[in-house]
Image: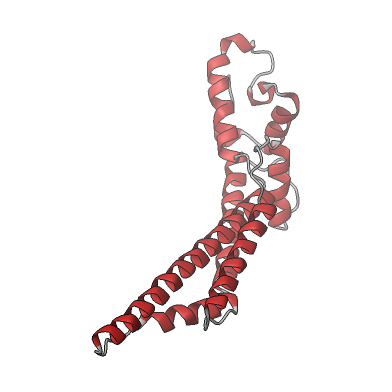
């Protein structure tokens, strides 16, 4: 009475999305809905789950947001490391004066300072430079919040998801493509996005 997942084509899904009626998933139009309601609900859920609710643009934005957040985490970790190493250096210098003995300084301080300069362009030499680093990080935090505001996720129409994948993959739109083929195409698109964002992060 119902189509098998491998029999469903995108045209069926577009009709489902447009009409919110699952008639397009039935094999025979004359079969009463009440005879296959549970099976139809299950099949409809499988279709929605297979396609997902994120367009290519949504996925790219999510990856950008994740990379931005990772950079913030790195900057905050460097700031903490600078404070720890500078504080340690001050204590070592104090013990040198009090005990009149030579103490080995931390080898990590210069490494941390070099990393800060690599990622921010700020060279830590004075307490003012640490304040500059703090202000720089706060600016990045504010920018992140501005670019990626916490908004309530709205339902994305399946047609938008479908069109976005064809567009991203530079494939001609084909409403007769089988669902299982489209799912593979969408997976390839997601892999490409992931790889592109990973390259951007490394650069």
Q: Is residue 4 visible?
A: no
Q: Nearer the viewer, residue 136 or 203?
A: 136
Could you tell me which residue is drawn at 68 percent across and 36 percent down?
154
Residue 96 placed where, x, y %? Answer: 29, 86
Say if 150 sits above or below 111 in the image: above
Residue 3 placed where, x, y %? Answer: 59, 27
Q: Is residue 22 left or right of residue 35?
A: right
Residue lying at the far front of the rendered structure: 98
Say if 2 sits above or below 54 in the image: above
Q: Is residue 105 left or right of residue 194?
A: left
Say if 92 sits above or below 148 in the image: below
Could you tell me which residue is drawn at 40 percent across and 80 percent down?
109
Residue 77 placed where, x, y %? Answer: 46, 65
Which image quarter is the C terminus in?
Answer: bottom right
Could you tell me which residue is drawn at 60 percent across and 46 percent down?
181
Q: Nearer the viewer, residue 103 or 35?
A: 103
The picture quadrant where one finds residue 191 is bottom right
Count up the numbered dots. Answer: 0
Q: Is residue 90 left or right of residue 114?
A: left
Q: Is residue 27 visible?
A: yes
Which image quarter is the N terminus in?
Answer: top right
Q: Nearer the viewer, residue 89 or 183?
A: 89
Say if 193 sits above or below 39 in the image: below
Q: Is residue 181 left or right of residue 146?
A: left
Could you tell me which residue is drawn at 32 percent across and 85 percent down?
105
Colouring used for the render: secondary structure
Residue 126 placed where, x, y %? Answer: 53, 81
The picture quadrant where one finds residue 121 is bottom right
């Amino acid at each position: 009475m119902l189509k098998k997942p491998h029999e469903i084509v995108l045209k069926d899904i577009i009709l489902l999305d447009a009409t919110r009626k699952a008639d397009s998933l039935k094999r025979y139009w004359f079969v009463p809905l009440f005879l296959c309601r549970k099976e139809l609900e299950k099949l409809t859920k499988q279709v929605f789950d297979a396609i997902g609710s994120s367009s290519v643009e949504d996925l790219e934005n999510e990856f950008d947001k994740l990379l931005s957040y990772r950079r913030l985490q790195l900057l905050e970790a460097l700031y903490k490391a600078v404070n720890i190493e500078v504080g340690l250096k001050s204590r070592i210098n104090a013990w040198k004066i009090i005990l009149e003995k030579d103490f080995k300084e931390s080898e990590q301080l210069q490494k941390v300072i070099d990393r800060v300069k690599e990622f921010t362009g700020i060279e830590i030499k004075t307490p003012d430079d640490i304040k500059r680093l703090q202000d720089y990080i706060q600016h990045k935090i504010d920018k992140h919040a501005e670019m990626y505001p916490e908004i309530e996720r709205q339902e994305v129409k399946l047609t938008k998801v479908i069109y976005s994948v064809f567009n991203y993959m530079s494939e001609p739109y084909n409403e007769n493509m089988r669902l299982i083929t489209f799912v593979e195409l969408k997976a390839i698109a997601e892999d490409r996005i992931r790889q592109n964002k990973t390259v951007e992060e490394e650069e």
